[in-house]
Image (spheres, helix red, strand yellow):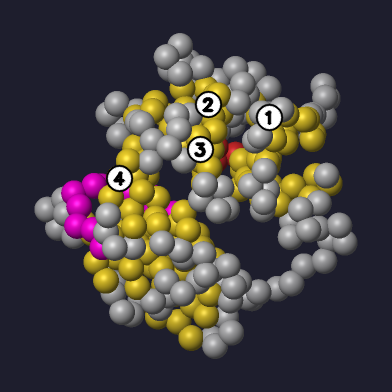
Amino acid sequence: PRTGESTLMSATILPHFLSTAWSNNRKEVISVFRDGSAIKLRYFNYATKQGSPLEAGARSAVFSPDGSLIAYFRNLDEGRGEIILAQPNGSGQKRILATRIASPRLTWIDQERLSVFISDDGTGLGYLLKLSVDGDLEAATEPQLGMEALWSPDGSHLLLSFFDGDGNLGLYIQRAGEDPEPLGIPGYASHCTWALDGTAVFCGVPQSPVLFGKTDPTMVVSESIYRITIADKTSKTIFAPQKGDMRISVENIFLSSLEDVVVFINGFDGKLYGVAL
């Protein structure tokens, strides 16, 4: 990020491309494409130059931390679905859960557990579940209004954002077996990233209050960037635009490999930026 150097991964134009999920080995991807009204997923290995489509109905595919497995949701007929484990190319499928959950979002907590997030559009509540690779299912936390969640790298802590009883958006930390504790800072968990050692999070923090039912959820909100230490819940401003500066809204945030630069896409202009730590 400091030199501005870049590496071209592929010069191929991908028609109807929507998004890509990368394996941690940075050699394999699962890409999402639109085909008419259908959504299709395709695996590709940049090392071997081999690729294959995942089965019809596959959604929300994610690589396990060591890259040896993928998990995905398969949409069946009559409102039925199932969560599948497979090899990265889609072979060796194993069903671990049959469900009537519509369009869950999957992430890996660690190599043995998945996180299943469900949003109820009718009530606005978010539900977060833990699913073992053997199919054991349990609640990860209580349902919350407008909830978002981000697991720490080792799966021991959970960063949450949701609206409290007064309609105020806030960030919370939850340790295993405990209730969520407020961090005293507003923000969306999706605008945050964990430090690799799990001791801190870096977040885009709204410069104005975000209120349920009053702040348009589709509106791009001006933010500053904070570092929040988990142990004592203290925060430090990393970057705060002043009057007349370029406005930022932090999306797709992550840390550089040396953890000396915070990188994000600015929601106001769609460009990639970095802030040195």
Marks 1 and 4, how far apart in space? 29 Å
Q: Which residue reaches farthest left?
A: 78
Q: Amino acid at mark 3?
A: Arg
Question: Residue 276 placed where, x, y %?
Answer: 84, 46
Marks 2 and 3, how far apart in space? 9 Å
Write the start and end of the magenta stretch as one range.
96-107
What residue is shown with label 3? 175
Q: Nearer the viewer, residue 121 or 136?
A: 136
What residue is shown with label 2? 181
Residue contact at pointers 1 and 2, CB within 8 angstroms: no
Dot 1: few (<14), some (14–19), or many (≥20) neighbours within 10 Å? Answer: few
Q: Of callouts 1 and 4, which one flags the residue occurring earlier in the amino acid sequence?
A: 4
What residue is shown with label 1? 232
Helix, strand, or loop for circle 4?
strand
Position of residue 43 relative to residue 243, above or below, is below
Q: Amino acid at mark 1?
A: Asp
Q: Amino acid at mark 2?
A: Glu
Question: Residue 128 placed where, x, y %?
Answer: 37, 41
Relative to 176, is 264 on the left or the right?
right
Q: Of callouts 2 and 4, which one flags the residue occurring earlier in the amino acid sequence?
A: 4
Position of residue 17 relative to residue 157, above or below, is below
Q: Of callouts 1 and 2, which one flags the residue occurring earlier in the amino acid sequence?
A: 2
Quadrant in the picture for the C terminus: top right
Q: Which residue reaches farthest right?
A: 3
Q: Nearer the viewer, residue 49 or 27?
A: 27
Query: Disc number at residue 164?
Result: none
Residue displayed at 45% across by 11% down: 166
Residue contact at pointers 3 and 1, CB within 8 angstroms: no
Q: Quadrant of residue 69?
A: bottom left
Helix, strand, or loop for circle 2?
strand
